[in-house]
Image (spheres, helix red, strand yellow):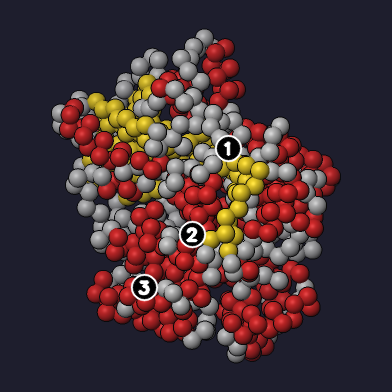
Amino acid sequence: MCGLTGFLNFKGEAAALAARAGAMTEKLHHRGPDAGAVWCDAEAGIALGHRRLSILDLSPLGAQPMHSKCGRYVIAFNGEIYNFADLRRELEARGAAFAGHSDTEILVEGFAAWGLEQTLARTNGMFAIALWDRTERRLMLARDRLGEKPVYYGWHGGVFLFGSELKALHGWPEFRPEIDRDVVPLYLRHNYVPGPYCIYRGVKQLVPGTFVVVTANGSGHLPEPRPYWSLAAAVQAGKAAPFDGDAAAAVEALDAAMRRSVRLRMVADVPLGAFLSGGIDSSTVVALMQAESTRPVRTFSIGFDEREYDEAPHAKAVAQHLGTDHTELYVTSEEARAVIPRLADMYDEPFADSSQIPTYLVSALARRHVTVAMSGDAGDELFAGYTRYSLALELWQRLAVAPAPLRALAARLLTVLPPRHWDRIFAALGPLVPARYRFRAPGDKLHKLAALALLREPMQMYFRLISLWKEAGSMVPGAHEPATVLCPPELDARFSNHVERMMYLDAVHYLPSDILVKVDRASMAVSLESRVPFLDHDVVGLAWRMPHEYKVRDGVGKWVLRQVLARYVPPALFERPKMGFGIPIDHWLRGALRDWAEHLLDARRLESAGYIDATPVRAAWRAHLAGEGGFQYALWGVLMFEAWRERWRH
């Protein structure tokens, strides 16, 4: 894994270009501590910078920026091309010869042989790519299909800047970014900034499955991304050619596709392991890794003293059954909270998924032993694993037939008790509560359901469920919240049911802008490469070919995935209520973090900055301190925004 950066359209001597590119590149040292280099062409005004985390071909033959043998192309590349051996054989059949065995060399020679779009279409991998065409004097930026690797870009003072993280752009001496006020409501709604938007005006995130072409004479103009792959097209292809086997054949097909994905991602010239929570997704990945390995796989998990957040015993049980070389680390609340001051620097755009803390901790643990770690992310989006899918649909089905006054009464009854009292009731009832309703923080979820009771359409419920501040659009003075992929009308005809539509929206919005951002920044902060087998595009295509009843049965998701895992792990070890990867942020904000939060949420401070209306924030803070409302995640979003603003002096 690596980091890339650079610029176009800067007029200066070669030494000046190299110095500026070097400063930007050094900001990404954590992404690639093994080596760093820049390449520049003063006449063209172009510079590429690269930091290297050596994974394949550890020799200097894998160093970047790298030139094609014909001399036309120069590449800076962040990621892995898993099918590089197949592509190499294709290129060798055309007469190509290679100096080393890195995937970077295969990629740049592929561009020389097949061009940009054909080469991207042939790849199976995760990547962000900066490619300079010396003949046409064009800069091309590309991103992988599902959005595992990031790239930001924009014009600033007549110079086109780009980089794996915004830190690199901060390395440009004249970079004076301005917060985009219109984007702040989007952030408050979701606790992340969804692509293609960026927190800074005039800067964009390249969306997954696309590339842009930039020329020096296009100063100030941001070209429209061009797709080379899209999930929408994959969904349509799956609907046009659905899986025609029975349930047993579907289990066999998914097992085979996932084993191939895992096998491809186990290729590395450095130590490799996996995150293991003991849940269905990570356990499946680890089980298939162990099936493909002749020695025990290295696995890692984090434990917490708070029992309701502690997945370590489940992970240990799965590890013992599979025979992995397992390492677990129990961290105290104090050790977990010690990560918080680093978050605004680690996520140099506002980001507030609180599981960023345990994700960082498990990444740091793994990095002590390995350089590459497999992740179980994306199983929920592909196989309907999130509880909000079934809850939204079931609630809508029940409420749609109820008169409005009855629904309003139900909402009032659900909110009579504060969330913590509902938590105690559920805990006291214990096994009397059906298994599908045994989830963490039931009081918060009941209060969320109460807010949904007056809605009459499941997609409205979905949108409300994923909105931390339901009135986010009015919380930022003078802002106009922009549209996102969550509400285009043409989606209605694409899906046979509402759960499928929710899955699709999560895969193009929540997955690349939250889940994959969280994992990328947390792992890269400790120079660890993370790989996601569920995001092999062949696995994604297969998932969307399968009928919905193979994913959801009796209101429970991941049916076909559970059957695959049951081939390797007894169901008793993984059939339990979904936990997620969380921390007791609600308790911390009332306790050890209260003074820190009071400082950042001070009304005068918020009013002076002028980005967020202090009135609803202070009301939510008072309610939270009183144990009411379940506002902790919404407040965490404001806290992370303010901590980020303080760190970057905005």
**3D distance between C-alphas at marks 2 and 1:** 22 Å
Q: Which label number is shown at residue 272?
A: 1
**3D distance between C-alphas at marks 1 and 3:** 38 Å
Amino acid type, callout 2: Ile
Between disc 2 and disc 1, whose residue precedes?
1
Read off the residue under disc 3. 596
Location of residue 570 in the rendering, given as x and y in whole percent from the top left corner:
80, 52
Amino acid type, callout 1: Leu
Q: In which quarter of the view is residue 330 placed?
A: bottom right
| Residue in view at x 50 percent, y 12 percent | 96
Q: Is residue 19 above or below residue 553?
A: above
Label 1 residue SS: strand
Of all residues shown, which one is farthest toward the left? 13
Q: Quadrant of the C terminus?
A: bottom left
Q: In which quarter of the view is residue 444 placed?
A: bottom right
Location of residue 201 in the rendering, given as x and y in whole percent from the top left corner:
30, 55
| Residue in view at x 46 percent, y 14 percent | 99
Location of residue 196 in the rendering, given as x and y in whole percent from the top left corner:
41, 51
Residue 375 as seen in the image, left or right of residue 633:
right
Q: Which label number is shown at residue 357?
A: 2
Amino acid type, callout 3: Trp
